[in-house]
Image (cartoon, helix red, strand yellow):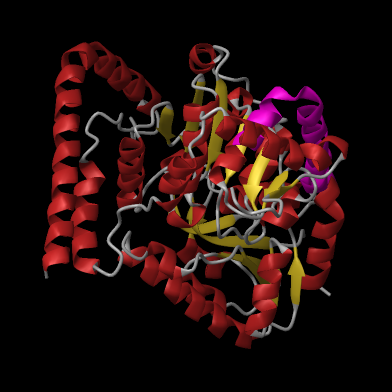
Amino acid sequence: MAETTPSFRIAGEQGGRAFERVRARLADRVARSVLDPQEVEWVSAMRLHTFVGDEAASEIFRRCCVTWEVDRPARITSHRAVIGPLLVALKRAVRRMLRFQTEAQLSRQRDFNWNLLLLLRELLERERRES
Amino acid sequence: MPRTLHQLVPNLAFGDAISQQALTLRRLLREAGLHSEIFAEHVDAELRGEARRYRELRDAAGADAAVLYHFSIGSELTDVYRLLSGPRALVYHNITPPEYFDGVNAQVAALCARGREELAALRAHGALAVADSEFNRRELEALGFDKTAVFPIVLDPERYRAAPLARLERPYRDGHVNFLHVGRLVPNKRIEDVLKVFYFYRRRINPDSRLFLVGIDTDMEIYAVALRQMIHDLGLSGVAFPGRVTQRELVTYYRLAHVYLCMSEHEGFCAPLIEAMHFGVPVIAYAAGAVPETLGDAGALVVRKDFAEIAELAALICEDSALREEMIAAGRARVERFVPQAMAPRLAELLGALWP
């Protein structure tokens, strides 16, 4: 926010005035303590947790990531040319009928997988820091 | 007998801009009276029947048949293309620099690195190299390609005529502001920066808002999980990952969107910008790669990532109808440059270069 040069460009009559208006609105939000400059810094500095420079850990973790979301609906297909559409419709109907049974368990499994994934990442990070 | 122009693509995938360009080109070429087919290494289940196995190309292409090779990653198709004897052209869609995939997927990083090597080797063939943006063309020129041209991605309005899905649209037509990003969840697209902008908008400007991140995370699972982790760390809600969507779903998301946000740092063209403008969605995009030339003067071009400021800009665009209408009108005018009618003379030029 300390920068004075425009951070964006918009063509046109309205667009030409947009930067000044954005600046004024932002200053007003800071003045009213709706926006805290420290929060802006904190968010801007936030980085993603990946495995830069650690190919082995990255591959282990990637494999875990592939299947953690167990309740993500898998695509229903059929390789049969003629009765394929009928089979797909049937499979869809069966899945819909069973959903109320499976959804709760899958959701719990998904939460467990997610937490396990975070734990695994944390352990890998810790090991990396210590070695 | 009609002239033949075939296309060679590594993957014919649903929702992928390169695949869509190949399908649109095939339609235009066929309408122009040419015989044209697509040959691919991998074909998505949804597109089965749209392409033949790439191994059949050499038999299908006679001595006079021309071939366009869509190039964006290292592939064994490069050898197939190299061994062709007829007229041919490389269509360069850019290769994501491998370092973006460091810590995310070493195999994809290696394929990108291999792609760059293959590209450098192809310059010796002297064939025409067509880029879908001036940004890409300059890269080809810097690599030493002699004959280069620009042929942008074509926006085929027919694809977007599908009616929106009522069951998807209804719950989201609730007065909330919908942010949209369309594209694979890949590190160069800097979706974490989209999240940061949305964080300031939702937390400090308007809690009645949501963000749709439409796109698949295949091979990018670590990145997708890291994004979810960031959402968790930010304490952010209102972010949806619809994953792979059908064409009707895609149309619905565009119709639901109030702002299209792109913070990508490497783009060879960025087709979703054109799609968003086609649907009358104001675009805010970071000026990287080919984005400035694709967007032109039709959107908000971000030159410095000040996330709180971008969020405030999004709010202004949503609230100020005069600014919003101006941007939408500019977007619609911009799209006209990429529709098939506008691209017809450039297609004729391309064919003229293949068969001088």
Q: Which residue sits at x=76%, y=70%?
A: B149
User: Which of the pair A38/A131 is nearer the observer?
Assistant: A38
Q: Which residue sits at x=30%, y=15%?
A: A93
Which residues are the magenta region?
B312-341
Which residue lies most toward the bottom here? B124
**A44 relative to B251 in the view: left or right:** left
User: Which of the pair B49/B197 is nearer the observer?
Assistant: B197
Residue B236 covered by magenta stretch: no
Q: Which quarter of the figure is the C terminus of chain A placed in?
A: bottom left
Measured as percent of width and height from the top left, residue A41 is found at 45, 48
Measured as percent of width and height from the top left, residue A52 is found at 31, 65
- The rendered magenta stretch, by its main secondary structure, is classed as helix
Which residue lies most toward the front here? A31
Residue B331 covered by magenta stretch: yes
Measured as percent of width and height from the top left, residue B119 is found at 55, 77
Measured as percent of width and height from the top left, residue B322 is found at 82, 26
Q: Which residue sits at x=53%, y=58%?
A: B39
Asked if residue B66 shows in the view, the reply is no
Q: Dividing the picture into quarters, in which one does residue B70 lie?
A: bottom right
